[in-house]
Image (tube, rainbow, N blue to C red):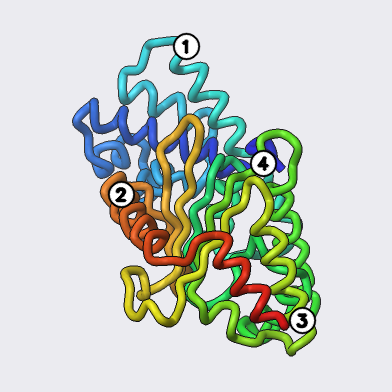
């Protein structure tokens, strides 16, 4: 997978630049909405990268913002065209909107920093573990569960692709490796896979031991996505999940993640704990 297979990253970049242009023009979303005959929330959705933007709408926006630099216009037109393509994940059925946006951005990320409080990170799950987890937590049909399993498996290709594989740093609460999901055989296989992946050159796994007591980040899991040519974003999990692109939010989560890493066992100690748990 690459960004070429996902419209999310181009939409995100386009929306960010359009927001900057609007702010430079000293216009509110209400001002622009009046000129486009649409609601302020529609403008916000465009700027948030949540929807694709038609060529005609983009051209009208650039007129409103008085953009005349042809190179800049051409760049925005390309982003708009890329943002109208169909995401690779669409073939796996309906996914929550925020989650679809997240895995679309994930496809273009250079590095992921993932903290998980309850379950193995999706990038490091075995099919059997994923299947058991989804069957227990979603109440979906077997067909829908299988579609989601396949989608997660395709996401994992980011870690093993030959061209610039995704760099993953995962910090897990010890409860992740202690909680049995899918039965003893499924969990044993999952722990072996987790330990094996923890030895990969582009993957780091660290465990936060129970003995460490309370720590920052216990409120919920989150992931920070870093890009080569764009600002980082945070995906914070809840019942629905949400994406936070604001620099202040990203820095706050980044600080928490560094504190989690400092409190966790070393990668070698973590792999040993995982292997001991599987025996």
Do tag 1 and tag 2 residues touch (Cβ < 8 Å)? no
Between 268 and 192, the residue placed more toward the observer is: 268
Q: Are marks 3 and 1 in contact (CB under 8 Å)?
A: no
Nearer the observer: mark 3 or 2; the answer is 3
Q: Which residue is mark 2?
A: 251
> Which of the numbered marks, if any, corresponds to residue 186?
3
Q: Which mark is residue 198?
A: none
Give whichever of discs 1 and 4 has the lower sequence position: 1
Q: Mark 1 falls on what kind of element?
A: helix
The reply to whether callout 3 and callout 2 are in contact (CB within 8 Å) is no
Q: CA distance from mark 4 to mark 2?
A: 24 Å
The mark nearer the N terminus, 4 or 3, is 4
Task: Report how far apart the C-alphas of labels 1 and 4 lie in the structure.
Answer: 31 Å
Within 10 Å of disc 4 (Cα), the crowding (few <14, some 14-19, many 20+) is some
Q: How many angstroms separate mark 1 from mark 2 (CA)?
A: 32 Å
Relative image position of residue 36 (x, y in whole percent): 37, 37
CA gap, disc 3 to disc 1?
A: 54 Å
Q: Which mark is residue 165?
A: 4
Q: How many marks?
A: 4
Q: Residue at x 30, y 44 (%)?
A: 247
Residue at left 42%, top 60%? 261
Residue at disc 3, secondary structure: helix
Q: Earlier in the sequence, mark 3 or mark 2?
A: 3
């Amino acid at each position: 997978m690459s960004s070429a297979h996902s419209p999310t990253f181009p939409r995100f970049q386009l929306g960010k630049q359009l927001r900057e242009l609007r702010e430079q023009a000293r216009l509110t979303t209400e001002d622009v909405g009046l000129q486009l005959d649409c609601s302020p929330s529609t403008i916000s959705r465009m700027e948030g990268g949540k929807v694709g933007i038609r060529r005609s709408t983009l051209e009208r926006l650039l007129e409103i913002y008085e953009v005349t630099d042809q190179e800049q216009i051409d760049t925005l037109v390309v982003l708009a065209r890329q943002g109208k393509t169909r995401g690779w994940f669409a073939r796996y059925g309906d996914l929550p909107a925020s989650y679809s946006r997240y895995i679309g951005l994930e496809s273009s990320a250079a590095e992921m920093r993932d903290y998980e409080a309850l379950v193995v990170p999706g990038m490091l799950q075995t099919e059997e573990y994923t299947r058991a987890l989804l069957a227990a937590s979603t109440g979906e049909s077997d067909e829908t569960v299988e579609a989601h399993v396949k989608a997660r498996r395709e996401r994992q290709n980011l870690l093993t692709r030959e061209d610039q594989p995704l760099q993953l740093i995962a910090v897990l609460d010890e409860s992740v490796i202690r909680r049995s999901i899918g039965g003893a055989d499924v969990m044993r296989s999952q722990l072996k896979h987790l330990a094996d992946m923890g030895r990969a050159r582009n993957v780091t796994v660290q465990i936060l031991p129970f003995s460490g007591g309370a720590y920052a980040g216990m409120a919920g899991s989150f992931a920070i996505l870093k890009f080569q040519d764009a600002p980082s974003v945070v995906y914070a999990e809840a019942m629905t999940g949400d994406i936070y692109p604001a620099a202040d939010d990203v820095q706050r989560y980044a600080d928490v993640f560094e504190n989690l890493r400092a409190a966790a066992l070393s990668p070698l100690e973590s792999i040993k704990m995982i292997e001991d748990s599987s025996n």
